[in-house]
Amino acid sequence: MTDSTGAQARIYTAPRTDVSRDQGGFRTHFNFPGRAVPDHDDHGYGPLSTVVESFMDPGTRIRMHQHREEEIISWVPAGVMRHDDRQDNELVTDAGTLLVMNAGSGFWHAEETLADDPPLRMLQIFVRPHSLGLDPDIQHGPIPDPADNEWRHLFGPEGGDAPFYVRNEVDCYDCRLEAGATTTLPTRADRETYLYVFDGAVTLGGESLGYTESALVTGGDVSLTAEEDATLVAFVLGPDAPVTRQGTIGR
């Protein structure tokens, strides 16, 4: 597929991940964007290390633990995720808010669902920062209301126009695409895009993608059509951005 400038787009699809961890009330499935590309020598792709589909049963607590040298974004499309930390924050993240931990040199936190909370399914996104030893920070607050069939900008590089920032070249968007609707995958010059299908099914440039499947798109514009109502998350990233690889989880 080519765009209006003649650039050729390549689409590398990936099935649902088979890398999982079961801790009882907390279960995680690890999606590695770099593994979509044949012979790629890194599980991540540039600054985007890992996209983790996480489940928490009601009444589950993940005890206080430390993250270092990574940016961790919690995207919660439904339900609630409760956060507390050693900076005395007590935060609730839900469909109207976003949580970004810029762990830097070290950040301690815990996660919890209460017994009367609904079962939680969310994405926890790990971004590699551009430098080691950065100051730790935490961001939490509202995100713009979603609009059907439109991409919503969630976070981007520090100093940009996104509501939240990470310290490397990754912009994140989500979209609720109605069955039969068509849109264009977010991209920009010198960037590549990783698409994750959180729910539903789409056709991306002639390739079919379903529930929890993903694709990495390099070069050119690509259209996608929802075969059924779909919830999508797209990461527009700089593949050659300088990265560090000493994160607690993402690396």
Image (cartoon, rainbow, N blue to C red):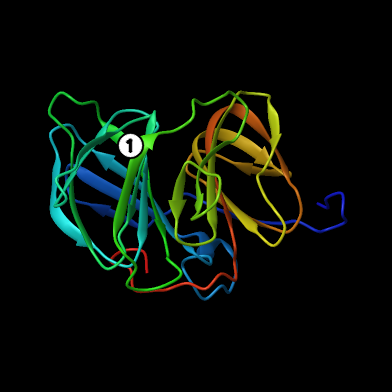
The C terminus lies in quadrant:
bottom left
Does 146 appear above or below 133? Answer: above
Q: How many marks?
A: 1
As rendered, which of 130 and 38 lies closer to the eye?
130
Q: Residue at x 30, y 55 (%)?
A: 137
Residue 150, quarter of the rendered image: top right
Q: Residue at x 64, y 42 (%)?
A: 208
- Could you say whether the residue bearing mark 1 is in a helix, strand or loop? strand
Residue 76 visible? The answer is: no
> Dot 1: within a 10 Å radius of its alpha carbon, few (fewer than 14), some, or many (20 or more) residues?
many
Give amino acid for label 1: Arg
Q: Which residue is mark 1?
A: 121
Residue 238 visible? The answer is: yes
Residue 99, quarter of the rendered image: top left
Does 120 appear above or below 26? Answer: above
Query: Where residue 63 appears, x then y in whole percent?
Result: 11, 50
In the rendered structure, the answer to whether residue 113 lies left or right of residue 208 reads left
Query: Where residue 115 appears, x then y in whole percent?
Result: 12, 28
Residue 111, quarter of the rendered image: top left
In the rendered structure, the answer to whether residue 6 lies left or right of residue 186 reads right
Query: Where residue 169 appears, x then y in whole percent?
Result: 54, 60
Does 211 appear above or below 247? Answer: above
Does 162 appear above or below 135? Answer: above
Q: Which residue lies most toward the front here? A: 159
Query: Where residue 104 appears, x then y in whole percent?
Result: 31, 65
As rendered, which of 4 and 54 lies closer to the eye?
4
